[in-house]
């Protein structure tokens, strides 16, 4: 059970926002529109390949080996097995279809509304500020965070480095021991937050076998976060 927590920092993708579903729908729609879907053995193979390449090249971006734009070019080239005349335009068409599928998880808005009366809320994300602000605005969630959003692209450090978690705490005006962090990636989010001195929550929506380190709390939904931070209350018990 956490101690006196006064603030909560959130990851965005696959924590508040259903990134995996929007990526899948957008990619398959894009490949169909481009006449490329038949180039793959199955839709699932295409999605798995795109995701694997994204994880590898985005990690290079976070490590400073590629710019945000360069990692997109490399992803397209690797995925198609060839260069395309205009990588930026190809990726823009894909991104537009993904954006049409953007959706927050059903528990995101009610949980943020339940926490807002008592806790200072913010975001720490391994992405660019403009991209994540646009996403939060489109989802109707941006108002819960104000200016308390720190992203690796502008900050210069990526999760799990302790500095970016501490930067989020600074935006909340709180010491790390008074801040909870919740994210879907165990190594990057949960262990990174714990190492920085925050109260770490690992959001495991899939409900797989969990054997976390001491100091990491596993939750299966954001509603469980509300219960953990407000014992005896649920998302329906709003403060007046």
Image (cartoon, rainbow, N blue to C red):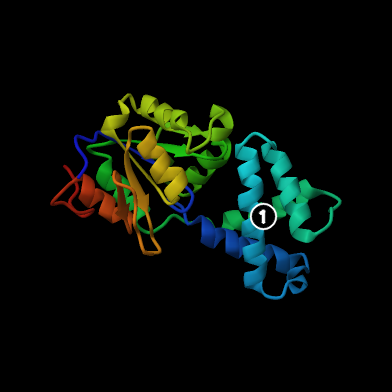
- Quarter of the rendering containing residue 224: bottom left
Between residue 124 and residue 164, name the one nearer to us: 164
How many marks on residues? 1
Q: Residue 93 vs residue 200: left or right?
A: right
Percent position of residue 140, x then y: 43, 47
Instruction: Give the quadrant of the C terminus.
Output: top left
User: Within 10 angstroms of label 1, few (less than 14), some, or many (20 or more) residues?
Assistant: some
Vertical placement of 94 versus 72: above or below? below
SS at circle 1: helix
**Name of the residue lying farthest toward the left:** 232
Vertical placement of 161 versus 226: above or below? above
Percent position of residue 159, x then y: 49, 38
Q: Residue 57 vs residue 124: left or right?
A: right
**Name of the residue lying farthest toward the right:** 85
- Quarter of the rendering containing residue 98: bottom right
The residue shown at (53%, 35%) is 158
Can residue 180 be spotted in the picture? yes
Vertical placement of 97 versus 137: above or below? below
The residue shown at (33%, 59%) is 220
Percent position of residue 234, x then y: 20, 54
Percent position of residue 72, x then y: 71, 46
Between residue 46 and residue 121, name the one nearer to us: 46
Q: Which residue is mark 1?
A: 53
The residue shown at (78%, 69%) is 35
Q: Residue 33 vs residue 148: left or right?
A: right
Between residue 225 and residue 201, name the one nearer to us: 201
Instruction: Give the quadrant of the N terminus.
Output: top left
Can residue 144 be spotted in the picture? no
């Amino acid at each position: 059970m956490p101690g006196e927590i006064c603030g909560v920092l959130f990851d965005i993708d696959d924590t508040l926002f259903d990134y995996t579903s929007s990526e899948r729908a957008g990619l398959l729609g894009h490949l169909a529109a481009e006449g490329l879907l038949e180039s793959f053995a199955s839709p699932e193979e295409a999605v798995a390949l795109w995701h694997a390449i994204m994880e590898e090249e985005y990690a290079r971006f976070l490590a400073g080996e590629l710019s945000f734009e360069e990692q997109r070019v490399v992803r397209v080239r690797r995925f198609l097995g060839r260069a395309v005349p205009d990588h930026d335009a190809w990726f823009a068409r894909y991104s537009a279809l993904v954006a049409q599928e953007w959706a927050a998880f059903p528990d995101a808005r009610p949980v943020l509304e339940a926490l807002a009366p008592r806790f200072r809320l913010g975001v720490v994300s391994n992405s660019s500020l403009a991209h994540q602000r646009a996403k939060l605005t489109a989802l109707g969630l941006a108002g819960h965070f104000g200016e308390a959003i720190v992203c690796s692209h502008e900050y210069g450090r990526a999760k799990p480095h302790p500095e970016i978690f501490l930067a989020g705490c600074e935006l909340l005006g709180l010491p790390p021991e008074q801040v909870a962090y919740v994210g879907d990636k165990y190594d990057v989010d949960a262990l990174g937050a714990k190492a920085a001195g925050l109260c770490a929550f690992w959001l495991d929506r899939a409900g797989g076998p969990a054997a976390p380190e001491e100091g990491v709390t596993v939750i299966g939904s954001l509603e469980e976060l509300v219960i953990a931070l407000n014992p005896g209350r649920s998302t329906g018990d709003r403060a007046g």
